[in-house]
């Protein structure tokens, strides 16, 4: 038995509200009650007038679940949106915008050649690989027709926390372009250089402000950071290949093993905004100019020294000290770093020998004859007699002393210049060493970042697979639950149908029985003999 509160009364039925909040129609029969009374009734089959609050909530929850489940497979509700951008620079330069399913929604040319290139490319809602293949095929008539190219691929995501990986997209396109070059230009593979990398969103914004692609703007930042002079106007009009030919440093910067990481590129963007890159470039240029100036001075000094050496060799030396100093100067020119101090000591020894010779000549009253000098006993044209020989020797010694003093000053200047040159070379070597160490650290950091990204992507993939698996299991459970509810409903419906048929059969049986009893009487009201359909013998009934 069930209980309920009377909510509505009609001629044939009573609407009651059960304890679980559901409404049920009950046959009124001869029941006497009023609205608000609690009555007891037998369960004659459920017939609700309207669902309860809990029932409506369950329906709404089921609808929301279906929408969310549908959205998880479609990527999002509503129309698709761009979640990532990819730029390809061959000159032409183009940019593509893709949705979460990596289907191209946008395609634009970033320069005049790029606009012409994409005119014949069908891209709307096409897979990324298909559109890229169309771009490469169109480039065969322009950029690829030269048999060489520098291809730069850059990708960035709008939401870094989304499900699309800019690193994977860049690597996927690099592999596709490489395979295309190997197939279309098998004999010129080495003439095509391909660089791909993931860039932060800040690079795309800065590149758009300057009217270039993400790839070219990254080349500009790296060139500026490394001391290579590349302007944005050149990047707008020239290909990366032509710029690399004019500036070999650019080709080294964009080598596959030296492609910068996303964090490094972001740092360069910040340094460009703050003006730090301009200061670094000016310092590079200043150091380079000073190094070139020092190199030219060194070459000029070397040429002057060679000329002086040849001039000394062509003249006849007058005294032994001068000959020795000439030899010392020659040795100094050949090996300045090793014999500089020895030459100075030798010069001082020669001075002392000359002074000693002068003293001896004063005491003896004769002139000391040195190898290569003129014998004073022999009269030469324009020479003086023996009475003036001593005075001439003193004058020669003073001339030699003045020449040696001048040579010492030259040696001092040479030593200072050599020290400056050595200091400059040492500084450049140390700077190069520091740059190499920084590059190695950057490479190590990039490898660590790659490993961390791979791990994050693997964790994300596993988490997505787990979520998908859980959603599938939940969907199956909901499906089983719905099937069970449907089976139960059908079973109840069948039971009600059987009950209705049984009642109809009982009613028909009663009606048939009444009809048969009525047929046993004749017109006079007497009982007659008749055959019952369920018996094989006639029945005889007595008259009343």
Image: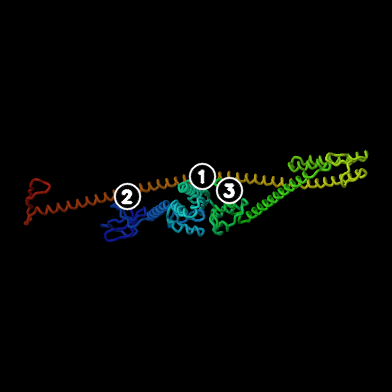
Instruction: Give the number of callouts.
Output: 3
Q: Secondary structure at mark 1?
A: helix
Judging depth in this view, the residue of 420 and 408 nearest the camera is 408
* Mark pair 3, 2: CA separation: 70 Å
Q: Secondary structure at mark 2?
A: helix
Q: Is residue 147 left or right of residue 315?
A: left
Mark 2, Cα crowd under 10 Å, few <14 / some 14-19 / many 20+, is: few
> Mark 1 and mark 2 in contact (Cβ < 8 Å)?
no
* In this rendering, the label closer to the viewer, 1 or 3: 3
- Specify which label sits upstream in the sequence, 3 or 2: 3
* Mark pair 2, 1: CA separation: 47 Å
> Mark 2 and mark 3 in contact (Cβ < 8 Å)?
no
> Mark 3 and mark 1 in contact (Cβ < 8 Å)?
no
Q: Does the rendering let one see residue 159?
A: no
Q: Position of residue 51 (x, y in %)?
A: 35, 56
Mark 1, Cα crowd under 10 Å, few <14 / some 14-19 / many 20+, is: some
Judging depth in this view, the residue of 536 and 272 nearest the camera is 272
Mark 3, Cα crowd under 10 Å, few <14 / some 14-19 / many 20+, is: some
Q: Is residue 464 above or below residue 25?
A: above
Which disc number belongs to residue 252? Answer: 3
Residue behind mark 1: 454
* In this rendering, the label closer to the viewer, 2 or 1: 1
Q: Secondary structure at mark 3?
A: helix
* In this rendering, the label closer to the viewer, 3 or 2: 3
Residue behind mark 2: 486
- Specify which label sits upstream in the sequence, 1 or 3: 3
Q: Does the rendering let one see residue 439?
A: yes
Q: Position of residue 23 (x, y in %)?
A: 33, 56
């Amino acid at each position: 038995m069930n209980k309920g509160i009377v909510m509505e009364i009609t001629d044939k039925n009573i609407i009651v509200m059960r304890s679980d909040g559901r409404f049920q129609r009950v046959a009124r029969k001869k029941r006497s009650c009023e609205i608000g009374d609690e009555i007891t009734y037998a369960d004659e089959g459920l017939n609700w007038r309207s669902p309860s609050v809990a029932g409506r909530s369950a329906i709404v929850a089921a609808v929301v679940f279906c929408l969310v489940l549908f959205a998880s497979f479609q990527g999002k509700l509503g129309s698709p949106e761009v979640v990532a951008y990819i730029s390809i620079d061959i000159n032409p330069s183009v940019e593509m915008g893709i949705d979460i399913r990596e289907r191209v929604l946008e395609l634009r040319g970033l320069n005049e050649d790029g606009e012409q290139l994409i005119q014949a490319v069908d891209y709307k809602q096409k897979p990324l690989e298909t559109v890229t293949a169309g771009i490469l095929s169109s480039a065969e008539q322009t950029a690829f027709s030269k048999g060489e190219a520098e291809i730069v691929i850059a990708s960035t995501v709008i939401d870094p926390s989304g499900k699309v990986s800019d690193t994977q997209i860049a690597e996927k396109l690099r592999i596709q372009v490489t395979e295309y070059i190997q197939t279309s230009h098998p004999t010129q593979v080495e003439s095509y250089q391909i660089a791909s990398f993931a860039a932060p969103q800040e690079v795309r914004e800065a590149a758009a402000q300057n009217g270039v692609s993400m790839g070219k703007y990254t080349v500009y930042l790296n060139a500026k950071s490394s001391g290579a002079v590349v302007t944005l106007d050149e990047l707008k009009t020239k290909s990366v290949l032509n710029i690399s030919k004019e500036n070999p440093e650019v080709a080294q910067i964009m080598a596959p093993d030296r492609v910068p990481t996303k964090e490094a590129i972001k740092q360069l963007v910040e340094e460009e905004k703050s003006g730090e890159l301009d200061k670094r470039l000016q310092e590079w240029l200043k150091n380079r100019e000073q190094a070139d100036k020092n190199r030219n001075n060194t070459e000029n000094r070397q040429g002057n020294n060679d000329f002086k050496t040849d001039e000394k060799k062509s003249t006849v030396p007058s005294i032994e000290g001068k000959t020795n100093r000439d030899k010392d100067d020659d040795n100094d020119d050949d090996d300045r770093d090793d014999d500089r101090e020895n030459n100075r000591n030798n010069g001082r020894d020669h001075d002392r020998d000359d002074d000693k010779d002068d003293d001896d000549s004063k005491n003896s009253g004769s002139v000391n004859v040195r190898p290569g000098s003129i014998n004073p006993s022999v009269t030469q044209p324009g020479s003086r007699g023996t009475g003036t020989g001593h005075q001439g020797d003193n004058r020669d010694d003073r001339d030699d002393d003045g020449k040696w003093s001048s040579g010492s000053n030259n040696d001092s200047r040479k030593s200072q210049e050599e020290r400056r040159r050595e200091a400059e070379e040492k500084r450049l070597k140390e700077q190069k060493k520091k740059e190499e160490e920084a590059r190695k650290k950057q490479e190590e950091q990039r490898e660590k970042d790659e490993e961390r990204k791979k791990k994050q992507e693997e964790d994300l993939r596993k988490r997505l697979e787990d979520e998908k698996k859980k959603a599938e299991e939940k969907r199956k459970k909901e499906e089983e639950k719905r099937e069970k509810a449907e089976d139960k409903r059908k079973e109840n419906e069948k039971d009600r149908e059987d009950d209705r048929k049984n009642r109809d059969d009982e009613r028909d049986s009663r009606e048939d029985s009444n009809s048969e009893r009525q047929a046993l009487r004749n017109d006079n009201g007497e009982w007659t003999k008749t055959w019952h359909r369920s018996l094989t013998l006639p029945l005889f009934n007595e008259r009343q």
